[in-house]
Image: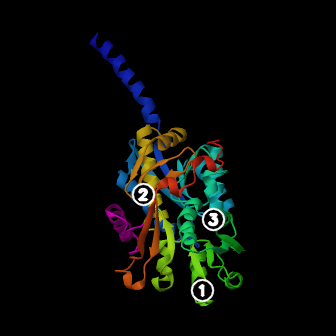
Amino acid sequence: MKRVCIWPAVLSAVFLATPAVAQVSDDVIKLGVLTDMSSLYADINGPGAVVATQMAVEDFGGTVLGKKIEVIQADVQNKADVAVAIAGRWYDTEKVDVILGTGASSSSLATSGVAKDKKKVYLATDPASSDITGKACNAYTIHWVYDTIALANGTGSAVVKAGGKTWFFLTADYAFGHALERDVTAVVTANDGKVVGGVRHPINTSDFSSFLLQAQSSKAQIIGLANAGGDTINSIKQGAEFGLLAGGQKLAGLLVFISDIHTIGLKQAQGLNLTEAFYWDLNDNTRAWSKRWSAKMNGRMPTMIQAGFYSATRNYLEAIKAAGTDDADKVIAKLKSTPMDDPLFGKGYVRKDGRKMHDMHLFEVKKPEESKGPWDYYKLVRTIPAEEAFRPMDKGGCPLVN
């Protein structure tokens, strides 16, 4: 009789436990890092983004809900068609649960579309275009680190308020550049400034001479660099060679990373204003993590995007743990309903439109004599509260909101 009574209870317990075990698809949590591994943005994200993701997995213990966490990687080449092909294969065939990246705004918007169609999680840690949480938003994409609105409200606003009233744009001719020029233009005109012209250049070009000559002849006070990575570095270096600064014009790097400053050098970069979500020397938490990352990256210091891969991975894994499943809808719901206190980005949350909210910081690049050593490049001008830095949720045209 005792055996008869015990076995139904045991079977009942097993039955009740089974769904919890089955909540992890394919018995593994698979993360796909799809980013620029070899082109003009490789220093900004690239191998350093993979290292940051792996660090997050290691810090989490290598497992979640009793299942192994696996990281795979690929080079997106900043091409939309490559992004679509890899994202589709990863989600469908290789059973990737989440994609992080994916390089340029154009390729990232393409990945976002695949995530929407496949109903899979996409954490947009690389791109800048504010359209990702605007007209192109969807329920499966979270824009993690920064966007063109935050850059406009940071660097653009600071420069125009400091007296830079006439602008000429040097713009990368794809989705990111167009969005950045648009959003900075709105800030310039709202502060009684004026855009007197602009020119668009191909992505990853090496010769900026004709574009800089047009900027020089415009007589604009400010030449706004609506580009990034190698394009920004070449713009600044060649701008100095053309004597733009000597002629009284100023360059405004609208998206500048610490890796860019390292390449350009303080002598040429000193005095530049720039907006970042993260700086390695901002506080004890950022310093401790950055030194660990640096030890794996030959003494370099991380960009805000590379820090974003760590942050997004940790919070994604926390959401799986809290939800008790890797189901995309439930994980996204948990991410959007749980306040965050991130050691790298501080307090934050994810809005309904998919915008990850946290404070941004306006920095000024130090003079050479102000730097205390390698990678000591920034001084903090002001911290911009999240609600001031990013666009109001009802102003972006996101269908999830309207």
Residue 323 visible in rendering: yes
- Tell me the SS state at disc 1: loop
Residue 201 visible in rendering: no
Q: Distance between the residues labelled 3 and 2?
A: 22 Å
Instruction: Tell me the kind of residue under disc 3.
Output: Leu
The residue closer to the viewer here, 271 or 316, is 271
Q: Distance between the residues labelled 2 and 1?
A: 37 Å
Say the numbered circle drawn on residue 31.
none
What residue span does the magenta drawing correspond to? 279-300
Q: Earlier in the sequence, mark 2 or mark 1?
A: 1
Instruction: Tell me the kind of residue under disc 1.
Output: Gly
Q: Earlier in the sequence, mark 3 or mark 2?
A: 3
To which residue does mark 3 refer?
180
Q: In the image, residue 291 lies at what x, y percent? A: 34, 68
The residue closer to the viewer here, 254 or 71, is 254
Mark 3 Cα-neighbour bin, 10 Å: few <14, some 14–19, many ≥20: many
Is residue 260 on the magenta stretch?
Answer: no
To which residue does mark 1 refer?
248
122 above or below 13?
below
**For discs 2 and 1, the disc positioned in front in the rendered view:** 1
Q: In the image, residue 287 lies at what x, y percent? A: 34, 66
Q: Distance between the residues labelled 3 and 1?
A: 24 Å
Instruction: Tell me the kind of residue under disc 2.
Output: Phe
To which residue does mark 2 refer?
345
Q: In the image, residue 250 lies at what x, y percent? A: 58, 80
User: Quarter-wise, where is residue 401 in the image?
Assistant: top right
